[in-house]
Amino acid sequence: MRESKGSVGIVGLGLIGGSLGLDLRALGWSVQGLVHRTATAERALERGLVDAVSTDPLCLSACDLVILALPIPALLAPDPTLLKAIPRSAVVTDVGSVKQPVQEVWRSLHPRFVPSHPMAGTASAGVEAGQVGLFQGRPWIATPEDGTDPTAVEVVQKLAQELGSQWYTASAAQHDQAVALISHMPVLVSAALLRAAGDERDPEIRRLAQCLASSGFADSTRIGGGNPDLGVAMASSNSAAVLKALAAYRWSLEQLEDAVLRNNWQQLHLELQRTQELRPDYLEVSPSDAV
Amino acid sequence: MRESKGSVGIVGLGLIGGSLGLDLRALGWSVQGLVHRTATAERALERGLVDAVSTDPLCLSACDLVILALPIPALLAPDPTLLKAIPRSAVVTDVGSVKQPVQEVWRSLHPRFVPSHPMAGTASAGVEAGQVGLFQGRPWIATPEDGTDPTAVEVVQKLAQELGSQWYTASAAQHDQAVALISHMPVLVSAALLRAAGDERDPEIRRLAQCLASSGFADSTRIGGGNPDLGVAMASSNSAAVLKALAAYRWSLEQLEDAVLRNNWQQLHLELQRTQELRPDYLEVSPSDAV
C-alpha cells in the first residue's frame, strides 16, 4: 500500500477537478471527491479520478486541503452545508478565473483560504473531461492579500509545483485585469466577428462569406463561438476589468482603422510589424521549450 | 511518355503557384514556370514544381493557359514584357484575394482574362511552400463580368474542378465584401488584440498577461500577428470593403459591450448563444465531410 501524502478534498470533478484528482492520486495523495449527482460520483470512481467520492459534504471532514473546483457562480454563492463541512484547520483554495469577487466572498468565510487560478484548460467539460498532466508547464497564479495565512499559501504553492505548474503571485486586481486583457475581453472581440458576418444584409455576400471562410476565420472565432454560460460568467464576474480592456481594445482598433481611412500604408505596416513582434511574448512555452 | 493535356504557364512559384504546378503536372499538364530569379528557377525544377522554368517571359509563348500567381501589388502593375509575352489566344487567370482592382487593370489588358481566386493557403511562402493537394475541397471563386469571354471562364472552371476545388461565381464587388468580412477585416481585429495587450501601462499586468495567455489568445491573434506585407496588401487593395466591414464589426462589438455595461447578462447570453450557433456555418468542410 502506498503511503499517502495527505488527504485532499476536491469539490467538483469537471475538467479542472477531475484532472487534479488524476494527477494528485498519481503523486500519492488520498483524493476525496465531492459532487452533486450520484451518476457523476459513480463515473468519477470508474475513471479513477478519486479514491473515494460522495454527494455528502461531510466526506470532507478529514481533509488537510480542500480545492474548490466549482464554476464561478457556485463559488460566489457557496452552499452553507459545504461551508460547515470544511474543517477550519484545512487549507482551502479555488481555481476560479476571476479573483477579486472570489476573494471578497471567501476572505470572511474561511481562515485559511488562498485565492488561486491554475491557467489550464481544454474545450471539454464534465466528468469525462479530466486528463492527466493538464497543469504541467502551465501558470498557476495565487493572489494572497494582507490577511491571507502565509502557511496556507505555502501549501498551495507546493501543490502547484508538484503538479508541474509555474507559480506566480500578484494582486487580485492585477490578475483580473490581465485575464480580462488576454482571455475575457477577447471572447467578446471574437464573438463580434461572427456577429458582424451574420448580420451582413446581402444574402449572396453572406453565403459567399460562409463558403470562403478559411482556417484564419475559424481560429479567430473559436473563443467567441464557445459556451455562452462561460462567456457570461467571465464577463459578469469581471465586468469592470472587461470594460476597461474593451476601451483599450477599441482605441487600438481605431488606430489601425485610422491608417486604412487615411490610406497611410506605411503607418499600417509599422502597426502590423509591431503586432507581429509582440505575438511571440504571448505564446505558451511548452515545458520542453522552457528548459 | 505521358500525353499532355495542354501547356499551362504559371507566373510566380510561391505557395499558390508551386502548389498549382505540382498538381497540374500530376494531372498531365505540361507546366511552364516563370520566375524572377535564377536561384528560384533552379529550386523549382529540383522540387518538381514545373516541367520547364525560365526567367524570360517569352517562355510563355506556347501556353494555352496562363495563371498569374503573383502578389497583389505585382498583379496590379504588371510588367510590360510579361504582358507582351502572353499569347492573345491563351486563357489568362489570376489567384488574387481581391477582385475589383484586378479586374479594373486586367479587363483592358487581355481579351481572355478571367478574374479568379482559389481560397487556399498555409502560413508558408516562397518556392519551398508549394504542396500537393492544396486546392482539394477548397472554394475557387471566379468573378466574370459582362465582357468576360465565357469560353475562357469554362476553361478556368474545368481547371479548378480538376484540382478538386468547389466552383463558385459572384460579382467582384460581392466577392471583395465577403473576403473583407471573413479575411481582411479580421486581420485588423486580431492585430488590435495584440496592440491592446502590448499597450497596457502597468508593467506587472503586462507581464502577467504574457504569462497567462493561453491557446485561446494564441488562436485569436494568429492572423493579426502574421506577415505585415500581406496585411497591408489586403487592406490597401480592398480598403472600401474593409472599412465597411470594420463599421459593421464596431457596431457588433458595441452591442456586446452594451450588454456588459448594463449588466444585462440575459442579453449577453442570447448574443453568445447566437454566435455559438453561427460559427459552424463558417467552418471549412473537409472533402470527406462534404460527400
Image (cartoon, coloured by chain):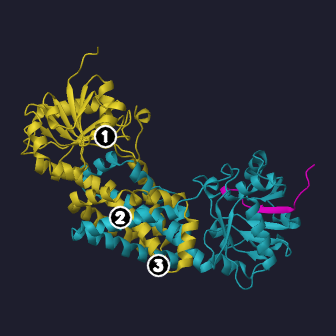
Chain colours: A cyan, B yellow
Name the quadrant of the N terminus of chain B: top left
Prevalent SS, magenta region? loop
Give the foreground label among 3 and 2.
Answer: 2
Q: Secondary structure at mark 1?
A: helix
Measuring from the top left, give residue A275's x and y in whole percent: 40, 65
Residue range of the region highlighted in magenta in the rendering? A1-15
Question: Which numbered mark, 1 or 2, is in the foreground of this view?
Answer: 1
Give the residue pinned by disc 2: A272
> What element does badge 3 sit on?
helix
Specify whether residue B225 is painted magenta: no
Q: Position of residue B14 (x, y in %)?
A: 31, 42
Figure check: B109 above or below B232: above
Instruction: Name the residue rendered at 26%, 57% in the picture.
Output: B233
On the rendered structure, is A11 left or right of B277? Answer: right
Which residue is identified by label 1? B39
Q: State if disc 2 and disc 3 touch (CB < 8 Å).
A: no
